[in-house]
Amino acid sequence: EDPRLRVSHLPFIPLLHIFKGSLLTPNFYLQEQEWGNYQNPELLPQMMQERRHVGAFFYRFMGGESGADVYDRVSSLQDTLFREFKKRDCPKNLVMITHGITMRLFIMKYFRWPIEVFEDLWNPDNCSMIVLEREEDSKTFELKTELWSNGGLYKQQVHHVIPKKLVRAPTSL
């Protein structure tokens, strides 16, 4: 499938009835990790074995991206979001629709987790929601969704302080 179509409005079509009147903005920062345009099915088992050995963060698919490349995109997205949060007309809630590795990298970047935590966490199931929530009187976002890792339920205390200049940040992310 053409990557340009995956980033376009097509994934939003089933959600249009839920978010009537909302601004739906496709964003290339949220696209899935590129695995290369032409994958050889016979080489895929070897590539996946190499990826397990090297780790999903650093392994780069032939003609594709590494998790580190996706992390860079997620970093740019978060910079953009923080600029949006400063605006008076910034929505109270934000819904992002993306893929598992991109979401794990978003959370890793946001909470400043080490690569080892990212590698240990599992991708969420298809159509799962991961909720970050901020209480009205708090300056921190908390991860409300339970995440699973190789060791079972991931239980690290997870919150992130919003810089003072972002007091008008949305209550959910």
Image (cartoon, rainbow, N blue to C red):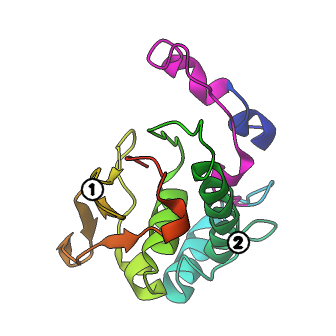
Q: Which residue is mark 1?
A: 137
Check if residue 27 falls in the magenta segment: yes
Say whether residue 136 is left or right of residue 34. Answer: left
Query: Where is 76 relative to 114, above or below?
Result: above
Mark 2 crowdedness (10 Å alpha carbons): few <14, some 14-19, many ≥20:
some
Report the amino acid beneath label 1: Asp
The amino acid marked with disc number 2 is Asp
Residue placed most toward the observer, 157 or 40: 157
Vertical order, 75 against 37 (above or below): below
* Residue 139 image-quadrant placement: bottom left
Residue at mark 1 to residue at mark 2: CA–CA distance? 35 Å
Q: Residue at x 59, y 35 (%)?
A: 89
Q: Nearer the viewer, residue 117 or 151?
A: 117
Q: Main secondary structure of the magenta part?
A: loop
Give the percent coordinates (x, y) of residue 25. 67, 33
Seen in the image, is 117 located left or right of residue 60?
A: left
Numbered disc 2: secondary structure: helix
Viewer-side label of 1, 2: 1
Left of 152 or right of it: where is 122? Answer: right
Which residue is the site of mark 2? 69
Q: Position of residue 66 (x, y in %)?
A: 67, 73
Picture quarter with the N terminus = top right
In this view of the protein, which residue sits in the foreground, 28 or 158? 158
Work out whether 21 lies above or below 137: above
Which span is picked out in magenta?
10-35
- State the image coordinates of residue 33 (x, y, percent, origin top left): 65, 59
Q: Position of residue 52 (x, y in %)?
A: 49, 80
Q: Quadrant of residue 92?
A: top left
Q: Which structural element holds mark 1?
A: loop
